[in-house]
Image: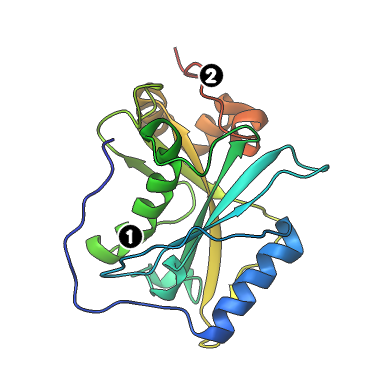
Amino acid sequence: MGLFSFGKKNKTYFYSEKDMDAYEKMIEDHFGKYNKVIHEIISPDLHIDVIPVPPSKERNYYVLFTMGMGAYRMSVPSSYGKMNRAEMAIRLPADWDIQSNEEKWYWPIGLIKSLARLPYYEKTYLGLYHDVDFGTAFSEETEMCGVLLDIFDKSVEPLVLESGDQVIVYNVIPIFRTEMDFKITHGAEALLEKLGDETIHGPLNMNRKSAVQ
């Protein structure tokens, strides 16, 4: 699937109970109620669960949020200040089988969990307009092989943890190799203009073609 494979670390990071409650409340208040969590069984480093917010009358798609990435303080530039923690989110069609472990259905979950671990293992950070190249296609059903990060919802303020650190939720946009190359040459904002609102803020479209020919 081309996702990162990370080795074992000694320390496992967790949210405090208060911070976890605050994060769950933020999701429910701004993005909708949910009735299940996809729990991670083995966590040698960060404990990354996934919260699937189901489709609703107002929103005809799933939103999947990581929960646990923000327990780790990323090595951000000084200009980021207290905005040094993050979580990942991706929108999936209402008919997506989020229960399945088959690669064709599971890869978006594996994708956001891999992104959640990347700063921890690479001693770096993920932020606005960053792109990540996974090297190979995410599944046999698509040629998309990288992602572009945007703010998931600009109307929602970052979550402030007990420590004073702030958690930003980033929108994970799967993209093609040609789109990654375009972003490197022309910048993220030019690529976002090419992608359009439906690709940026709508559910994953497995039938879409590259916006860059």
Report the coloring of the rendering. Answer: rainbow
Q: Establish if 17 lies above or below 80.
A: below
Give amino acid for label 2: Arg
Give the class, few, some or many, for how many residues have Cα within 10 Å of label 2's Cα (few <14, many ≥20). few
Kindly identify which residue carries mark 1. Answer: 117
The answer to whether 145 appears left or right of 150 in the picture is left
Residue 9, by quadrant, is: bottom left
Task: Identify the residue at the far right of this view.
Answer: 57
What is the three-letter code of the residue carrying label 1? Arg
Q: Note whether residue 130 is visible.
A: no
Query: Which disc is residue 75 wearing?
Result: none
Identify the element where label 1 is drawn.
Answer: helix
For disc 2, the marked residue is: 208
Residue plotted at (38% across, 73% down): 72
The percent coordinates of residue 182 (x first, y second) are: 40, 26
Label 1 – label 2 distance at C-alpha: 28 Å
At 53% from the left and 19% from the top, the residue drawn is 208
Helix, strand or loop status at disc 2: loop
- Above or below, 91 against 176 in this view is below
- Looking at the rendered structure, the number of numbered marks drawn on it comes to 2
The C terminus lies in quadrant? top left
Left/right placement of residue 108 relative to residue 202 reads left
Residue 69 appears left or right of 52: left
Task: Tell me the quadrant of the picture where the N terminus can be found.
Answer: top left
